[in-house]
Structure formats: C-alpha cells, structure tokens
Amino acid sequence: MAKLKNSLVLNALLALNFTFNLPAFALSEEVSKLRLEGKESLQAGKYGEAIDSLKKAYFQSGRDDLVAKDLAEAYFARAKTHENSPSEMLDDICIATFYDNDSRHIVLLKGKAISRLYGSDWDKQSLAAKKALEDNKPEVAIVLATELIYAQGASEADSKDTLQAALKKLELKVWPKNWDREKIDYSHYMNTVSTWLRGAWAPPSAGKSSRVEVIFNIKRNGEIKNLKVKQSSDNAITDKAAMDAVRLAEPFRPFEQGWPEEVTIEFNFDYNQHAVVAEANRDKLVKNTLDGIKIIEDAKRASKRKDFDEAIKKYEEAIEVSTTKSKAFMVGKLVDALINQGNKLMSKDDRDVPLDDVLKCYMRAFTLDSDYWLLKEKIDIALTKSGSSTPLDTMKQFYSKVAKDPDKADKQAAAGANRWISEHEK
C-alpha cells in the first residue's frame, strides 16, 4: 500500500525566516495617549482622525500588535461607510487586513469587496495590485497580490513580483509578519494528499512486489512542479504509472494562510497493490480503476475550460464506477468542482448573484467535506451577501426551500445546510 513518508521536506526556498519575535515592552506614555485618542475618535465615528492617531501610535510603538489591531478596526469601520464606493471600500479593507489578517469580520468583508470588484477575473485583480503599488498603496498591493497567489490558476509570477516590490517599499521581508512554519500542522493536509495519490494510483495488475518513490513540490495554489522519480522500481511501466497518478491527482488543495511558498513531498507507491485480490476479481478491479481514471481526465478537462457543471457530472459518474480505494479521492475532486461552480456564480455582479444556487453548490460540498477551511470561508462570504438577514437566518431560509425538493442535489444541499445550522446553533 502506498505510504506517506513521516517527514515533511521543505524546499530550500523556505530557509527564509517567517518568525518575527519582537521584544516585549510597555507602551510609552505618548503612544498610550495617541492610542486612547484614536479609540475615542473611532467611537465618535471620526474615522480619519482615528486612523491618523493610531497610525502614529503604531509606528512609535515599534509596530505593536495590539495597536495594529486597533488601527485595523479603524480602517474596517471606515470601509463599511463606503458601501456605494467599492474601490474605496476595497482600499480600506485591504489596509485593515494588512494590519490584522486574523479577525474574521475583516477577512469576510475583504472577501466580499474583492469578489464584488473582480469576481474570478485574476488578470483584472493583478492589474489592480500593480496600480495600487504605483499609487503608493503598498498595503493594498500586498493583500491583492497575496490573494492572487493563493487563488488556483492565478498568474503567480506577476503576483510575486508585485508582492516583493510592495514588501520592499515597506521595508518588510514577509507578510503577514506572524507567520511561523514551526507551528503549522500539516497532518490533515498530508493525509488528504496521501488519500488522493492512493486513489489515483492504477498499478500494474501482476508481477512481483516492488516500490517506486516519487518526489515533487506542491505550490500554494495546489499545483505541482519538479515531479520526478527518486527511487525507481526498475520497471518503466511501474515508474510511469506512479508519475501519472501524481499528475491525475493534481491540483491538490490550496494552502491555508500562513503556509510557506511550497512544500516538497516524497511518496512511495506499492507496485503490486492488487496482488492480495482474488484472481477472479482482479480484472474487474483494474477495469473499474481505469474506467474511473478516464472519467476523471474528462472532468479535469471540463474544469480547465471552466465548465464546472460538466465536471461535477463527470466526478459523480466516476464515483459510481470507482473502487473503494479511489472513492475518497474522487469525492475530494467533486467537492472542489462544486466549490468552483459556486465561485463562478459568486463572481457575477452582486445584484445578479443567485444566492440559492451558490449555496446549493457550497452546501452539497459541505455534506461531503465539512472540515475544509476554504469551503467554510466561501460559505461565510456567500451568507454576507444577504444584507437583510443574519447568516443563520439566511441558511434556515435556504434549508426550508431545498428540503422540500425531491431532487437528489437538493437533498444533498439540504443535508449540508442542516448540518451547518446544527453547528452554528450551539
């Protein structure tokens, strides 16, 4: 059976120090005074004055984290006043994110603002990041470029150049400054990678037992590079099957915020995986595996041309014919296709977004994988588009509609909505 190596090998690129340990010290009297003035101005709704005072406090404090959060709240408050000016809202919420990328309400408004202006048009967003840099808004450029680097299919080269130029302008080495790769828990992600690779593996059906070890890099957006055989099985067919499995499984899931540029994976594939299967069932097992792989290749082609509806149908078809070994991998790919279709619908102008259709995609995916961080984020963003109701009320209204429909997809969406409601009523 394929086995994931215990050690996670990080690329030499990651020699960059992502940890910034600032010495602890008490805020000076002057900084405390400026901070208090900023908070009072914020409470009075004088957002410009609040930002001026808190920005002075921030730099005089040596970029204190608590002052940074106060400054972020001031920019967030002002961003909400720009409902009728999307570009001004985007600038303020990006700067708020720059100073505090952890607070959920800031992250949600940032997602809404970016979706409202650019949808999934990454070229347009890339140009906006460059323009922000030209206009001396490096914080905005950093956030827009970072979002593009995370986005699957984004032009990473352009975005990285913009990001590095903006960081240099602010005399920073990295953003966010609290990245610490030593505290990252890769275990869940590595389990997913292992499951997908096992599911995509179609080993030869006969022959002596042996192994092939491959090595490759996964980039932030889940795409791979530098795939090669590290330890050959001494059989060209077996080596090719292992390489094909990695190519079929990609793209993997995008990295969470705070992760490094890329990780290097070393993975062992068992050569004679079907050896323990009874002879009478082996041919059928191999045929089902190969049939499922062919359908997945069709689904991936549909995804590349952004026909996610077709991709969803193909992945569902693949699941029907798949072996137990491959099912989890194919379900993972179906979840990604459902998210992509929801994103595609979400990218339309706010006034034209069919919220129920968006939620139907996301909640079907939620039924299949309720722990996926990116899916949770997308659901939250979608729910913020309903300004007249709370997220919980919006989900309950959605559930009441789809729960009545006998359609299989609606039943699946209803199950996901019901689960989400149960989790958020606690």
Image (tube, grey):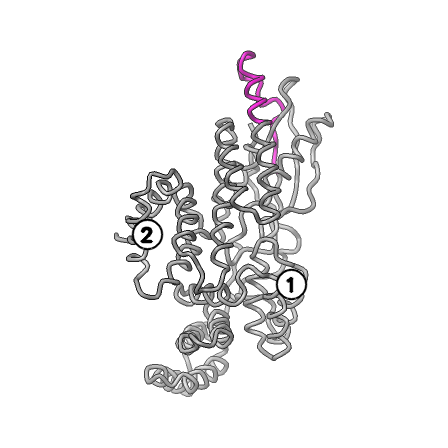
Rate crowding at label 1 as few (under 14), some (14 to 19) or many (20 or more) other CA atoms within 10 Å: some
- Between 343 and 147, which is closer to the camera in this rendering? 343
Prevailing SS of the magenta stretch: helix
Measuring from the top left, give residue 119's x and y in whole percent.
52, 61
- Between 206 and 9, which is closer to the camera in this rendering? 206
Front of the two marks 1 and 2: 2
Give the residues drawn in magenta, as a range. 267-290
The three-letter amino acid code for the residue at tag 1 is Lys
226 in relation to 151, above or below = above
Question: Visible in this render: residue 129?
Answer: yes
Measuring from the top left, give residue 264's x and y in whole percent.
62, 46
Measuring from the top left, give residue 374's x and y in whole percent.
47, 53
The picture quadrant where one finds residue 194 is top right
Tell me if residue 282 is in the magenta stretch.
yes
Measuring from the top left, give residue 173's x and y in whole percent.
61, 68
Quadrant of image for the N terminus: top right
